[in-house]
Amino acid sequence: MFTSNPFAELSTWISPSLMQAYVIVMIIMVAAGTIIDVLHKKSAKYFSENMRKSKALGTKEVGGGEMVSIAIKTAIVDVAASGEFCDQRRRITHLLTMYGFVLFAATTAIMIFGYIGSTTPAILPLLWHAGALMLCVGGYWFWFFIRVDVAAEGNAWYRVIRADLFILSLLATATFGLIWSALQAAGVAVWSALFFFLFIFASTVLFGGVLWSKFAHMFFFNDTATTEIYTEADGSRDGLPEPADQPEQFGPGIKRLAPKNY
Amino acid sequence: MPTFVYMTRCDGCGECVDICPSDIMHIDPVTRRAYNIEPNMCWECYSCVKACPQNAIDVRGYADFAPLGHSVRVLREEEKGTISWRIKFRDGREKNFVSPICTEKWGEKIEDLATLPVPDEEALNSELLCYEPDVLGYAGGLRKLPGKFKQGVYY
């Protein structure tokens, strides 16, 4: 199961060109959803105005070299290592789901476009399954234990709100994908077909629902992180006071307490 | 002045939701970021402002007496035991304050209420808080106010 390309076997009853067309349509839907989201929420305008305000309040000029260093710092600390999360459990679940999704999506595209008619290197399906498993571990951990409206507001884990569209469709895609692959490997044709259709339905909701879900956060987040670091560099500090001139003589205080007093 | 959240700075950790004594800091069902659901019910205790690890919560006055253009920003540094405030007025003036948030080490000097015995029936029905006055550091009843009030602030 873990070393066989599930899409290669699927090509016996769905043509490779149809699979490739589906992937292209999903990419177009994500791009279109993100662009409409940017226009609708005026996100680009908001971030550019924020940057302009920060420049006006700044006490020093940020040079080209410093801008490059800010970009690298944002890419490494905030994007690649999810450094913005203050809660380490949230950070771990975010890293698991983020890298799981990247592995899952990238290997899906590579296997569909490159290896349906030829022998698939074992590493690709292995990474596909690993990505789906990482998504499930991080996603279910987040869903049952870490969601703030469950942990901090005391709501039931099964209460679903619109903000859950992204995580639920993501989890459904990974879960149904894994079950479909397992059933296909076991040779159970009918159940395998059922879970394949559930997998396709979930992924269509995931990629087609960008406008209504939190999917676009992966594009906007970079702007937020860059703005924060930039305001540090130009001295405006986003209006925040300067750090106090006092020694660090106390413990982490309330930071050590999880917001879970319900 | 009630509080509001900069949605782009908030990471939805829930510290403000947990600490708000008025239970008006909630999680937005669309963006899963915190927001003040009812600013006119805000006690203005600023617990959420101080608790926010992302410094995402600011305060603003009602537009009738404090038109937009000012800002009140807070930086809480627990390891230093300080909380710093930067107040910017609409005319460009700026005031900065640094105050202690705690003068004792966390977890050492502050009574751990969970380890105290459960109060008896009489204590539960009392108008005093749990283990008041001992736990609040005074004995012999409430402090007496001066006999006659005059304009100003009493400490």
Image: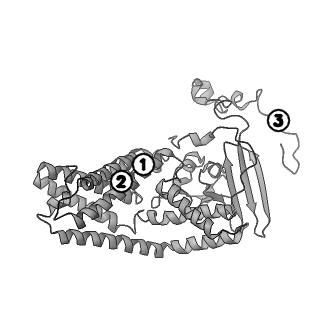
Q: Chain of mark 2?
A: A
Q: Nearer the viewer, mark 2 or mark 1?
A: 2
Q: Chain of mark 1?
A: A
Regarding residue B7, the answer to whether it shows in the image is no
Residue A249 drawn above or below residue A44: above
Q: CA distance from mark 1 to mark 3?
A: 54 Å
| First of labels 2, 1 by sequence position | 1
Same chain shared by disc 1 and disc 3? no
Q: Nearer the viewer, residue B122 or B61?
A: B61
Q: Amino acid at mark 2?
A: Gly
Q: Amino acid at mark 1?
A: Thr
Q: Which numbered dot is residue A93?
A: 1
Q: Amino acid at mark 3?
A: Lys
Residue B39 drawn above or below residue B117: below
* Circle 1: element type: helix
Q: Chain of mark 3?
A: B
Q: What residue lies at 20% left-to-right and 58% top-to-bottom?
A: A120
Residue A126, x across and y down, in percent? 26, 51
The image quadrant of residue A15 is: bottom left
Q: What residue lies at 67% left-to-right and 71% top-to-bottom?
A: A55
Residue with the mark numbered 2:
A100
CB atoms of marks 1 and 3 within 8 Å = no
Residue with the mark numbered 3:
B144
